Image (cartoon, coloured by chain):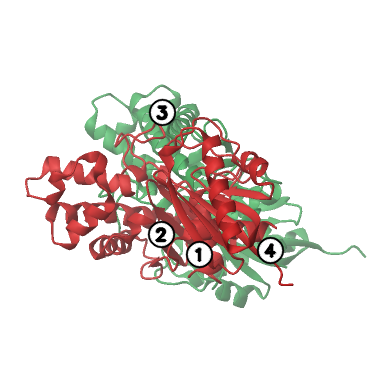
Chain colours: A red, B green
Amino acid sequence: MQEQQQVAVGIDIGGTNIMIGLITATGERLVEEGIRTWDFPRVEDLIERVHAIATGRAADLGAAIAGVGIGVPTGNSDDGTFHASNLPWKGVVPVVALFRARFGVPVFVVNDAKAALLGEMTYGAARGMRHFVVVTLGTGLGCGIVLNGELVYGHDGLAGELGHTIVVPGGRACGCGRRGCLETYVSATGIKRTAFELMATEVEDSPLREIPFSSLGSKAIDEAAGQGDPIAMKTLRAAGEMLGLALANLVAVVRPEAIFLQGGAARAGACFHEAIRRSMEENLLFLYKGKVAVLPSALPDGATIGASALVWRGL
Amino acid sequence: MQEQQQVAVGIDIGGTNIMIGLITATGERLVEEGIRTWDFPRVEDLIERVHAIATGRAADLGAAIAGVGIGVPTGNSDDGTFHASNLPWKGVVPVVALFRARFGVPVFVVNDAKAALLGEMTYGAARGMRHFVVVTLGTGLGCGIVLNGELVYGHDGLAGELGHTIVVPGGRACGCGRRGCLETYVSATGIKRTAFELMATEVEDSPLREIPFSSLGSKAIDEAAGQGDPIAMKTLRAAGEMLGLALANLVAVVRPEAIFLQGGAARAGACFHEAIRRSMEENLLFLYKGKVAVLPSALPDGATIGASALVWRGL
């Protein structure tokens, strides 16, 4: 009799979508399915739906679920909770306890950027590196840091909130209640806000002027930039320049060997990535110039794979 | 026959003074003597003088020198060199090889802030902490970081250059060749520059107006502030507010349990430290508010003691 295949459920909870993957211990993603975050105002309904999807798809495959790994903004591996400002569920959500009660298998949580980083470290381009950073550009800006070959959790599991460093004192309002956080400028949402600011301050015609704020995504901005739209190109350059400076400052503090960019907005085109690299190099202290690579992720989507890596590491 | 006492030579090379200590393995400082950095345009003359002081004082004590530990800006433990912009010796200085050739004992180097941190970790208030930061405020601003109980060296030993993070793009010229580095605002030199800026922009009378730029030290500013001088008080508050924001941003990235302040400028009075704490709390992400202590160092001078700790750890 053949042994039943074991899979981990990797869940990536983002501000727009929630991705659910069934993934083997070698990082093979057998299934991936997405649902919309704001369709679930009650976290219990979300868990019910994720359980139905995961157990249904596992049964189709004849696979057994070995554990559940979850990446979510502010996910705290120390106490198994999250407490995010850009998700529907308010207050502290005891996500590990809730999923464990429904699934009856071991459950692990980290913040979404650390999940992405675990994917890059376990199955991606960072294998073997001892000092590196992963920055995820989605609805927000996440960051995971590995130093001396170890993921940096900090004193209570909450290190790596690079997106909530204040880069423009008194600047744009952030979901966290403060102003001027990096992610209000550099993230899918931040890029959109810059596009709207530039449509207000500049006069050039642009296809972006036909799209309302609530519908505009970073993909549309990237496509317009690819067709030479000046507003879209300025938008991506401004975001890239701000990220480049932030990365130069991060390099001065933790000195990684490489920085990996993940997430939807990281798939923006050449003018974004050129601006990031040029601005980072210009702003690097002479000690580091020309020595830190900024690389696209080698994974199609690090977060579900990374969340699944939590399970195999934890078991 | 009594066994000969073993001492380490701890050397703290700063932009103004060089301190030389003879220190036991338990952190007892038997001797400390200072010389002036800019009296030694040739590094060979410096080494000769340090050797004469250390061997002379060790002979007086009847002690044997077990090793030499050096803390110096940009000190690189990986290759035993430094390459600092605010010291008399230009280019890459192979400091470990030069001292080893003269002393004939093991020699270790780290940057000055990491040396201060090793002192705090080995003999000071950070004993037993797994995640903490030491910020040194001298001629420049240094920073050492411990995560998971380990000193963060980064990819090539050059992590922790918080003083060279750019906090005001296009701001004050820095010795590193760029503009707007944190240490151009927050350090003994940075505080002096702010005092001169405020003497230019404000009209209040101040005893600081009698002192030329090249003579003004952070101690005189602190004394004037202690006597209620408005220019001096505004100066220290401005520096404290900028440091508080920088520390809030650093907390978001590495989430330490505590931050220790060391160095001459850290001895400034209440209005400086109140501004640091208030600004840090105001600028902290809600996840960290009220959870990170900012503490004065428990060591009288961490850098020579810390540099000596390098020797006992290395042997």
> Mark 2 — on which chain does it sit?
A
Neighbour tally class for label 2: few under 14, some 14-19, many 20 plus, Cα within 10 Å: many
Mark 1 and mark 3 in contact? Answer it, CB < 8 Å.
no
Residue drawn at x 66%, y 44% as measured from the top left = A100
The type of residue carrying mark 2 is Gln
The Cα atoms of the two marked residues, 1 and 4, are separated by 37 Å
> Mark 4 — on which chain does it sit?
B
Q: Where is residue A54 in the image (x, y as percent from the top left)?
A: 56, 52
Answer left or right for A259 relative to B145: left
Among the two numbered marks 1 and 2 on one chain, the one whose residue lies closer to the N terminus: 1
Q: Name the residue under label 2.
A: A262
Asked if one can make out residue B154 in the rendered structure from this viewpoint, the answer is: no
> Mark 1 — on which chain does it sit?
A
> Of circles 1 and 3, which is in front?
1
Q: In this view, does A257 lie above or below B126?
A: below
The type of residue carrying mark 4 is Val
Q: Mark 1 points at which residue?
A: A120
> Mark 3 — on which chain does it sit?
B
What is the quadrant of the N terminus of chain B in the image? bottom right
Residue drawn at x 62%, y 49% as measured from the top left = A108
Mark number, residue B311: 4
The Cα atoms of the two marked residues, 4 and 2, are separated by 42 Å
Residue B239 placement: quadrant: top left
Name the one closer to the observer, B208 or A155: A155
> Of circles 4 and 2, which is in front?
2
> Of circles 2 and 3, which is in front?
2
**Farthest top residue?**
B228
The type of residue carrying mark 1 is Glu
